[in-house]
Image: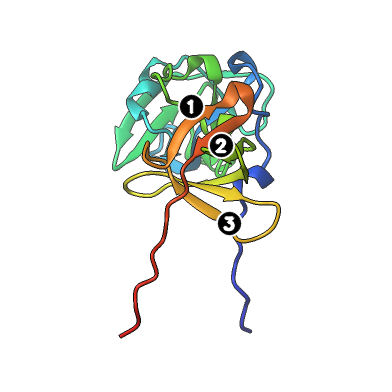
Amino acid sequence: MPRGPVRRRRLIETTGPDPATPLEQVRLVVGTIIGAHGVAGEAKLLLTTDDPEHLRTIKRVWVGREEQPRRLLGVRFHAGNALIRLPGVTTPEQVEALRGLQVRIAGTDARPNDEGEYFLFQLIGLRAYDEAGALLGTLTDILETGAHDVLVVTPEDGPELLLPNHPQYVLEIRPDEGRLTARPPVYVELPKP
């Protein structure tokens, strides 16, 4: 039976912290448990963090929607994934019960952002304006590409605007003010042969 196109959910449609949430209240996803490694209860973590080595400094994690953190007993890396050890998880069967759950860290445990860096949750929902102050729309999604992330701006009406997250196009990001300033790319239509 043919299926229609699958529409990917936008970040603005997912549950996540409000951009104004203080970092001490935020839980940032660093990976998803995808299975067991070996027979001693190590969990294989598909990483979603841009700084995997920082995991070695983390002492506690939240698994799934748990309210209380668990101690992180160990982290090592293998074949592009992290292998983590958690208290009370000593068999592959116990790891399998956690399969598909996200592993989160406290926002305050994350590597501090450099000047001009932001967490994705701080950008979703920002209002985008052009250099003259005209509203372009709301930032609804971020597409991660090989070179620069692409910010998806959805206007009140009309097609989405795709902005490469590059200083040539994104001039200023001000999460504290709920806005960003952009210079939309100009696309030139080539003459038909």
Element under disc 3: loop
Q: Which mark is residue 102?
A: 2
Q: Viewer-proximal residue, 98 or 41?
A: 98
Residue at the extreme front of the image, as rendered: 132
Give the Cα distance between marks 1 and 2. 21 Å
Q: Which mark is residue 118?
A: 1
Which of pointers 1 and 2 indicates the residue nearer the eye?
1
First-in-chain label (1 vs 3): 1
Which of pointers 2 and 3 indicates the residue nearer the eye?
3
Residue 138 position, x and y percent, is: 64, 43
First-in-chain label (2 vs 3): 2
- Name the quarter where the N terminus is drawn: bottom right
* Residue designated by label 3: 160
Give the Cα distance between marks 2 and 3. 30 Å
Q: Give yes or no for contact between labels 1 and 2 (Cβ–Cβ under 8 Å).
A: no
Element under disc 2: strand
Give the Cα distance between marks 1 and 3. 22 Å
Question: Is residue 90 visible in this depiction of the protein?
Answer: no
Q: Viewer-proximal residue, 131 or 1?
A: 131
